[in-house]
Image (cartoon, rainbow, N blue to C red):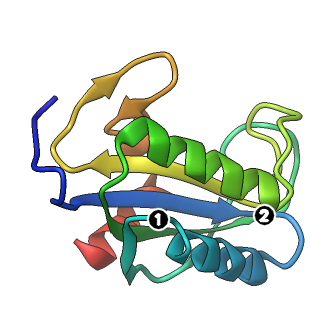
Amino acid sequence: MYLRKKKERVRVFLGIGTNLGNRYKNIKKAIILLKKMPDTIVKKISGLYETIPMGGPKQKNFINGVIKIETRLPPLKLLKYLKNIEKVLGRKKMVKNGPRPIDLDILFYGDEVINSKKLKIPHSRMFEREFVLKPLRDII
């Protein structure tokens, strides 16, 4: 973990996905809520891509993208805000790899590497998933 000045923002890449309800509306609502987070600026949004689900029960295709933000929130606090956005937009933990109205993941948090029970950065399966890599390439 590196030290940074209190006022310095960190560049963060978030994965976003949805396959329940009005998928484009879900993405739009999530972005609106991301823009309301304290000490956070949404800098760039990738193109959105329709992708087939990986694992889990039979379900609709996903819409996936990546969002670049700059934030002063520490990683675990950012994760807490993201989980709250998921909850506000109707996400419930039901079936592993099951359908969801919104999914938000921290892909990168600056140069930090975190390997805890609550959070793994960089995201542990990101490099296996074209639905993350393609939109990430859009905005790097």
Q: Is residue 53 visible?
A: no
Report the amino acid beneath label 1: Pro
> Residue 115, which numbered label?
none
Q: Is residue 87 above or below residue 113?
A: below
Residue at position x 52%, y 66% in the image: 37
Residue at position x 85%, y 33% in the image: 95
Question: Taking 82 as reference, is 124 left or right?
Answer: left
Front residue (pair 131, 38) = 38
Report the amino acid beneath label 2: Asn
Q: Is residue 139 above or below residue 62?
A: below
Residue at position x 74%, y 38% in the image: 97
Res. 18 image quadrant: bottom right
The answer for how far apart the CA atoms under marks 1 and 2 are is: 27 Å
Front residue (pair 38, 15) = 38
Q: Is residue 119 visible?
A: yes
Q: Earlier along the polypeptide chain: callout 1 or callout 2?
A: 2
Secondary structure, mark 1, is: loop
Q: Which image quarter is the N terminus in? A: top left
The residue sitting at the front extreme is 6
Tag 1–tag 2 contact (CB < 8 Å): no
Res. 76 image quadrant: top left
State the image coordinates of residue 92 (x, y, percent, origin top left): 86, 43
Residue at position x 29%, y 76% in the image: 139
State the image coordinates of residue 87 (x, y, percent, origin top left): 78, 51
Neighbour tally class for label 1: few under 14, some 14-19, many 20 plus, Cα within 10 Å: few
Mark 1 or mark 2, whichever is nearer to me: 1
List the residue tagged with mark 1. Answer: 38
Q: Which image quarter is the C terminus in? A: bottom left
Front residue (pair 85, 50) = 85
List the residue tagged with mark 2. Answer: 19
Secondary structure, mark 2, is: loop
